[in-house]
Amino acid sequence: MGNRFLLTETSKFTMLSGIAHDPIQRDIFTPLFLGAELHVPTAEDIGTPGRLAEWMDDSKVTVTHLTPAMGQLLSAQATRQIPSLQNAFFVGDVLTKRDCLRLQALAPNVQIINMYGTTETQRAVSYFAIPPLSVDATFLATQKDIMPAGEGMIDVQLLVVNRSDRNVPCAVGEVGEIYVRSGGLAEGYLDTEATAEKFVSNWFSPSTLPWRDTILHPPQGLAGPESRHWKGIRDRMYRSGDLGRYLPDGRVECTGRADDQVKIRGFRIELGEIDTLMSQHPLVRENVTLVRRDKDEEKILVSYFVPLQSSNLDGFASELTEDDEEVDGKSPKYRRLIKDIREHLKKKLPSYSIPSLFVPLHRMPLNPNGKIDKPALPFPDTAHAHATVNRRTASPTEQTMRTIWASILPNAPTPIPLDESFFDLGGHSILATRLIFEIRKIFVPTITGLACALDALRDPDFGIAYADAETRPATPVKASYGQDYETLDFKSGAVTVFLTGSTGYLGAFRLDRVRKVICVARLREGSNDRGVWDEQWFTSGRLEVVVGDLGLDLFGMGDEVWSRVAAEADVILHNGALVHWVYPYERLRAPNVIGTLTAVELASTKKQKLLVFVSSTSAIDTEHYVRLSDSLAQSQDSRGGIPEDDDLDGAKVGLKSGYGQSKWVSEKLLFEAGRRGLRGHIVRPGYIVGDSHTAVTNTDDFIWRMVKGCVQLGLVPDINNTVNMVPVDHVARCTALAAVEPLPNAAQSVLHITAVPPPTFNNILSSLAEYGFPTQQCEYLIWRRKLEQHVMEAQDNALFPLLHFVLDDLPTSTKAPELDATNTMALLHSQGQQCTFTVSDQLMGRYLAWLVGAGFLPAPSSSAPNKILPQLANGAVIKAAGRSGA
């Protein structure tokens, strides 16, 4: 190891192991053997946050031995880098990519070595080396979240053996138990049965070993005194109890502990998997999950975690009340964070693997060995472990339900929050069965009554209260969006346009494109923000506003207004939607899907009307369409992209966002309505950006967050994917034309609104340097690492809310299908309109000028930019515009 990692008499070692921890031998005797220096910190150096890094820098240490927990302690609140550190050997627990990134941020010259071994194997017996940033800056980006055990040291072999048949070694990728084959294994335990179980002869080798015993039979003379304790040459293996698999290069990857697999309510659960996924939350510094028993002696999962202290944590802080106080390091102010962590895990784990309780701690207790002291972790106080309690007074029915829940839930907080899920509070399927019986017994003794009550509870109305049960649309259970489409159907049944979504970013611009408008909602607010409002719309009688809501029956307008609108309107321009990139389909169904059905009903009431529906390319955001686009691009017969008459079946599964799923279902319903005779168009735009004249744009958008994040970082990634950016006024023009001058084949045919030619991410981001923003282009993997390091250090970047997305694999996730726009081109050509529109370098300059004027971006600071930001026209609105709808 000394030769492999260049350890010499000039090395400077640290001694961080406890005196009772067996690696203390390595800490002490390795530098003594080499004649190197050994530096020993004080207890204060180790225990004071940030001090350990300062001590290591002051001591100019070059080699350190750490456990992952000690490494987390080293990086926590560190303010000094350790440029002298050359080798960091980790042992004792699972080492994550996140641990490595944190250490590399502190020590850019460090080589990290993940070592694997146990006390029984004489400590470390294998290693996996991670090169310094200066040698390979992208190495960690190619690795999984857990660092592998690697390859055996000299005269050590790691064997992965089938757990069902130990005579069969595992194939590459197959999970089995790790056996360590070595001549340096411990002799055994005092317990002979345990020794026989864990230390076994190598059944893969021949019974007669080919080596000569030079201890019992030395080449010359008699055997020495050491032969009295010598048991002869043996080929033995140690059963580690660890699970692992072979990687294609022959190295071994640990996947967990055989005894970390627990069984709760009949489900097998991997504690290691929970901990790994929980550690990926951006505000979790360290964590561990244990099995505890509740008051009824039932086994439950409890996750303990230490929050990552940063300014971003403030956004998850809950207001403390007089009843709140910190108990045993557990703080009520983290209730919102707990809820966010739970939602994070729900996306990655089955419901039975979600911990019942989450306990925040100021720091993890460590035992003398530097590992998490699990017995010292406090038993959770359930009154402080759950999300924020709703402080309003409970209604009589809610109070009765609280009493029922308290009698059933094993760890119910007091009082039970009114807005928490039964399952988030520790409930499970068995307890839910008891809950149903209790509810039936007290509230609804009949099946019909129970069904009505459950249907009402299941309705994801997004906080919309219906006037009475008869007006409530039927709501499905949690079926997939593709299945939900099969269950939905329609009610039979110079222009005036009925417009929904008029206060949204795009809707505000549509007001300037049509003659007479009846619209729903708070109009002036959204239009004023975008510089579109004209007071004469009201005074001339061109505009009428009615109060309503997309999620309500009849759009919430009431029978009288509904009937009048149905008689007066000639076109329905359904632009409204609830735009949210996190909410699941169930929560968006009422305003987005049921709202579309209501628009169809309005289009066929009193008289037949044209219906124009504004969708999104998120309805085709699946791998199927990316592959189809690539295939069409190579076909000579192709028009260049996904055809507008595609049936969308390629997205029946695979859409990841609830918003995209709601648009998919709405489009499929309109396809069917078109087959039944409903005229109109489906407008499907891509990224909608600012007005091409005023440059007013929506700052709450991925593109502009990306631009701002790159300016803050000073780097832009090399991504050559095309991005379908279209100015909002071009989308508004196409939509208005679809409403007043539809194509002859307007039976809910699709209009793709695309940028021609489409810019690339490189085009967009390279304009930053052109206009004087100090940025440099680099490989994506380098940019990703620098961004993560920047966020960890500065805790301030516009991309922080999207970190999970941009750090995943942006060159892959931003690859979008090319779109054919034959219908749109025909529509524009028929009216003598400009058929091609794109975001040019000049238009990017206008957008950047507006973003600087609005205070969203800092002014360019380069002394000699290639181009100067243009001056915007007098009267251009300089106010950051957020998103308030489609």
Image (cartoon, grey):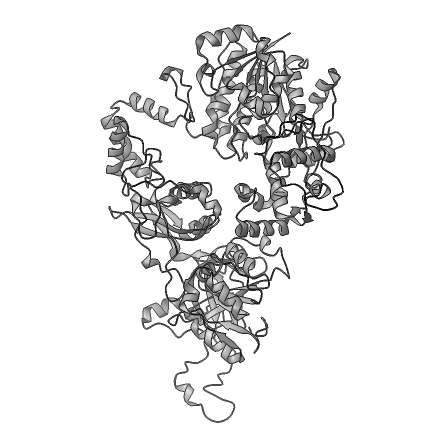
Q: Residue at x 39, y 21 (%)?
A: 465
- Residue that protrudes farthest toward the bottom in the picture: 221
Q: Residue at x 40, y 41 (%)?
A: 336
The N terminus is located in which quarter? bottom right
Q: Is residue 848 left or right of residue 332?
A: right
Residue occupying the point 69% across, 21% down: 823
The answer to whether residue 61 is seen in the rendering is: no
Q: Position of residue 76 (x, y in %)?
A: 47, 57
**Image location (x, y in percent) of residue 854:** 61, 34
Q: Which image quadrant for residue 118?
A: bottom left
The foreground one among 332 and 452 is: 332
The relative height of residue 184 versus residue 639 in the rendered view (above or below) is below
Q: Is residue 714 left or right of residue 525?
A: right
| Most distant residue in the front direction | 874
Measuring from the top left, give residue 199's x and y in whole percent: 40, 69
Q: Residue 438, percent across and down? A: 24, 31
Q: Quadrant of residue 21?
A: bottom left
